[in-house]
Amino acid sequence: MERGTAAALAGDLMLDFAKITGLAPAGPAPKRYLWTDAFAVCNYLELFQDSGDAEYRNIALELVDEVHHVLGKHRSDDGERGWISGLDEYEGERHPTAGGLRIGKPLPERLPGEPADPQREWEQDGQYYHYLTKWMHALSRVAAATGDPQYLRWAVELAKAVHPAFIYSPRGGRKRMYWKMSIDLSRPQVASMGQHDPLDGLVTYSEIASRARKLGVRTDLDGEIADMAGIVREGRLLTDDPLGAGGLLSDAWRIVQLTAAGGLDRPGLLEKVLGSAPLSVQFIAESDLLGLPAAHRLAFRELGLAIGLKGMERVKDCMSMKPGLFSRDAAHSAEALNAFLPLAGAIDRFWTDGRNWTVSTWREHREINMVMLATSLVPGEFLRA
């Protein structure tokens, strides 16, 4: 798809998203969901960069404010009021991320002592680490786009608030992470560890620290970065999930950018990430997943893969400009991914076909599907580090 056509469709999708979620025009009960909104902020910034239309930039800033005022505060049905950080209204306005941010799930979180229901848990509120890192990234991109360091300070405060809650050390064991925490960050709701959460945290913290140096924002994330590096060093990254594989590829591209800019120096990290990526993508490509009809596919998960592949399209050029920074193993793994790059276009073509929007799997996840499709069409701002 030509860039102009892709940008036009992405613009239509994002303006529709703003309407149906009560963002622009403003609605009485805005529907906010942290993962989707993080990608949406990046999309609006990219559309502004592409078109020069200030409406997109304004919507991006309005979305940041609305996320903080909706997901940074208690739900209307949980008996609590105000900021989830416990700060008063004045301090909460100044530090809206100091208590983390809710996911935005439709059901209240599981109460202390309430038996866990694995199916119901998917619809219950709380805090997800991998959603929080996506929001840190979005705030970093807003800081870069506007030159306003306040957005980066909020990203740092978010990292500082949630990191000690999600990280724990089993008795006599290495540090690990919880996958899901309660809204107040006092107890784990799902104790297992997200496979790529530590990697996403390591890359995102490094991005924030690099951006902070450029904007003159004082921060100290060295301890948090060291925690994540240790967990990543011991973990396995190979995955058969399209969204997970796409996240690996997106993180690999961010690592390349940060390394080239002097913002990340972790020997062996890129080799480990890229070493797992070709096999992960190959498994997906050789399965029948991408050949199934739309009713048996989840658009947002496939689009995550397409976004990551588009990041990999840029890796070769960056590596060739600074060859001394990147090992032969990393370059070889990046080269091995070239055979899979056409998958991104195939995924885009499938999901830009409006006939595939009529199935229940699209309609049930409409907002996240719309936003992820727009990101895949204009991925530049989301992929920047």
Image (spheres, rainbow, N blue to C red):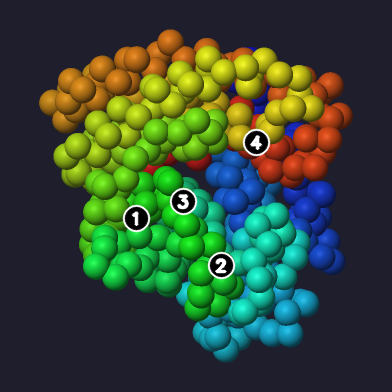
Of badges 4 and 2, nearer the viewer stands 2
Q: Does the CB distance between marks 2 and 3 fall below 8 Å?
A: no
Disc 3 from disc 4: Cα separation: 18 Å
Disc 2 from disc 1: Cα separation: 24 Å
Left of 161 or right of it: where is 83?
right
Element under disc 3:
loop
Of the two numbered discs 4 and 2 on the same chain, state the one appearing first in sequence: 2
Q: Nearer the viewer, residue 43 or 273?
A: 273
Check disc 2: other Cα within 10 Å, few if <14, some if 14-19, many if 20+: many
Element under disc 1:
helix
- Check disc 4 and report the residue beneath it: 300
Type of residue at label 1? Tyr
- Check disc 2 and report the residue beneath it: 189
Q: Quadrant of residue 177?
A: bottom left
Q: Residue furthest bottom?
A: 88
Of the two numbered discs 3 and 4 on the same chain, state the one appearing first in sequence: 3
Type of residue at label 2? Gln
Left of 141 or right of it: where is 2?
right
- Check disc 3 and report the residue beneath it: 194
